[in-house]
Image (cartoon, coloured by chain):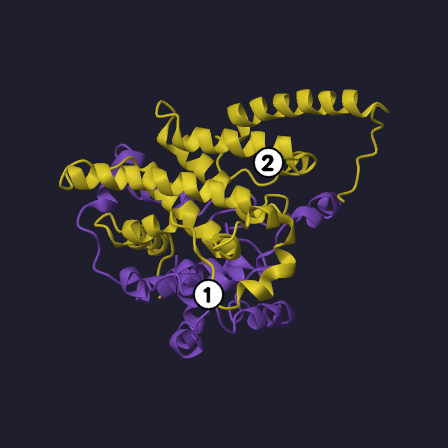
């Protein structure tokens, strides 16, 4: 969601950061939990819920022998990321930066710089490795833990 | 071009295509019945991803099946529909062979679905919550926007024919603001601001994971 907020802001689509930090919705979360998970409220239900929304089926393909089939038709996050999102592909970022000078793009460096640190966890997750947790049990990757902590702090 | 499999195929292109179409239909049925509902399936679905890249008709079939499963089949389980929405989001975001117009069409359908839900919610004065698929679809739009925002514009001219040239025209996209966001994205602004607060709800799932991490702070 923070990634969406960053892109939406950087492209001049809309500014939604305050909505991320808004007070918790009065009923929406419980409605969602009730609808998805009858008998939710247990920690088990919460786990299922959070994992359901963090599942992205076409996360980066990591099987070495068959990846040659997928790589040519697969869009990497680094190729579309707005400069500053990732710390692992500066060259791609520069290309984007050229296209971001004007038009749809708006100056946003100053506004979002302070978010870079917060979003690093998600940036890494989007780009280098995977959006969904990759390493077996859902919450063990460092990126995920960082993101969770950051979100909790916010 | 993607690499070809080593298995020999018939020489006749027509027979070849029909054969592949039949195979794809079979795969699609198996996928819908088994893979789609498999929690956190990691790689099996890439077989369809690759297959869909072979022919625009396959990609269209696959995407159509996913969208229909997510949006048009109220008898399906909520989790199945949410999973299908995740597939839609991930597929449109990641597949290079899904063009700009297909991405726009998908977002258009997803937006209208959300609009319908929000209409119902607001007409009921907040008494009737939309199905939970609402949040899965909202998340799908957010993800697609992150990956495909360059394609989600409508200029004064007809840009539907430019799908294959998107990569080369990124510079012009950034030119004077003759292009505007596709109109359906206005719905997203309304959705984001409504009392259902999808951004807040979806992002709130992340800290919930902290439940599992003792003393993580």
What residue sits 56% from the left and 48% below the top?
A: B100
In the rendering, what colour is chain A? Answer: purple
Assess disc 1: are there few (<14), some (14-19) or many (≥20) residues with their C-alpha within 10 Å of its C-alpha: few
Q: Earlier in the sequence, mark 1 or mark 2?
A: 2
Subunit that carries the residue with mark 2:
B
Label disc, if present, on residue B177 of the rendered structure: 1
**In the image, A28: left or right of B3?**
left
What residue sits 70% from the left and 36% below the top?
A: B54
Q: Nearer the viewer, residue A33 or A22?
A: A22
* Secondary element at tag 2: loop
| Residue that mark 2 sits on | B45
- B85, above or below A75, in the image: above
What residue sits 48% from the left and 41% below the top?
A: B105
Residue A38 falls in image quadrant: top left
Q: Residue furthest bottom?
A: A110
Residue B23 falls in image quadrant: top right
Assign the N terminus of chain B to one quadrant of the image: top right
In the rendering, what colour is chain B? Answer: yellow
Assess disc 2: are there few (<14), some (14-19) or many (≥20) residues with their C-alpha within 10 Å of its C-alpha: some
Dot 1 and dot 2 within a common chain: yes
Asked if one can make out residue A57 in the rendered structure from this viewpoint, the answer is no
User: x, y percentage for residue B101?
Assistant: 54, 44
User: x, y percentage for residue A86?
Assistant: 54, 67
């Amino acid at each position: 969601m923070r990634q969406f907020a960053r892109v939406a802001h950087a492209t001049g689509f809309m500014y939604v950061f305050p909505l991320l930090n808004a007070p918790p919705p009065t009923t929406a979360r419980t409605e969602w939990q009730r609808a998805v998970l009858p008998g939710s409220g247990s920690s088990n239900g919460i786990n299922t819920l959070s994992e359901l929304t963090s599942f992205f089926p076409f996360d980066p393909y990591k099987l070495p022998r068959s990846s040659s089939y997928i790589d040519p038709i697969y869009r990497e996050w680094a190729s579309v990321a707005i400069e500053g999102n990732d710390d692992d592909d500066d060259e791609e970022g520069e290309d984007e930066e050229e296209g971001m000078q004007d038009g749809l793009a708006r100056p946003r460096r100053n506004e979002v710089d302070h978010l870079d640190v917060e979003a690093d966890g998600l940036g890494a997750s989007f780009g280098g490795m995977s959006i969904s947790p990759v390493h077996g049990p859902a919450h063990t990757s460092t990126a995920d833990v960082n993101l969770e902590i950051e979100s909790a702090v916010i | 071009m993607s690499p070809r499999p080593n298995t020999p195929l018939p020489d006749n292109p027509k027979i070849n295509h029909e054969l592949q179409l039949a195979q794809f239909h079979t795969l699609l049925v198996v996928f819908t019945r088994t893979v789609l509902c498999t929690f956190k399936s990691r790689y099996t679905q890439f077989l369809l991803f690759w297959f869909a890249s072979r022919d625009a008709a396959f990609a269209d079939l696959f995407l159509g099946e996913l969208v229909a499963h997510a949006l048009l089949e109220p008898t399906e389980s909520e989790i199945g529909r949410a999973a299908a929405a995740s597939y839609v989001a991930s597929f449109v975001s990641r597949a290079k062979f899904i063009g700009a117009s297909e991405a726009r069409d998908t977002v258009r359908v997803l937006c209208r679905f959300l609009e319908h839900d929000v209409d119902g919610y607001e007409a009921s004065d907040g008494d009737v919550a939309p199905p939970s698929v609402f949040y899965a679809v909202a998340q799908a739009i957010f993800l697609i926007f992150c990956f495909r925002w360059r394609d989600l514009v409508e200029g004064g001219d007809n840009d539907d024919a430019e799908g294959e040239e998107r990569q080369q025209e990124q510079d012009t996209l950034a030119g004077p603001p003759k292009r505007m966001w596709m109109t359906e994205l206005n719905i997203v602004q309304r959705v984001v601001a409504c009392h259902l607060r999808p951004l807040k709800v979806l992002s709130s799932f992340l800290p919930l994971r902290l439940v599992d991490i003792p003393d993580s702070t």
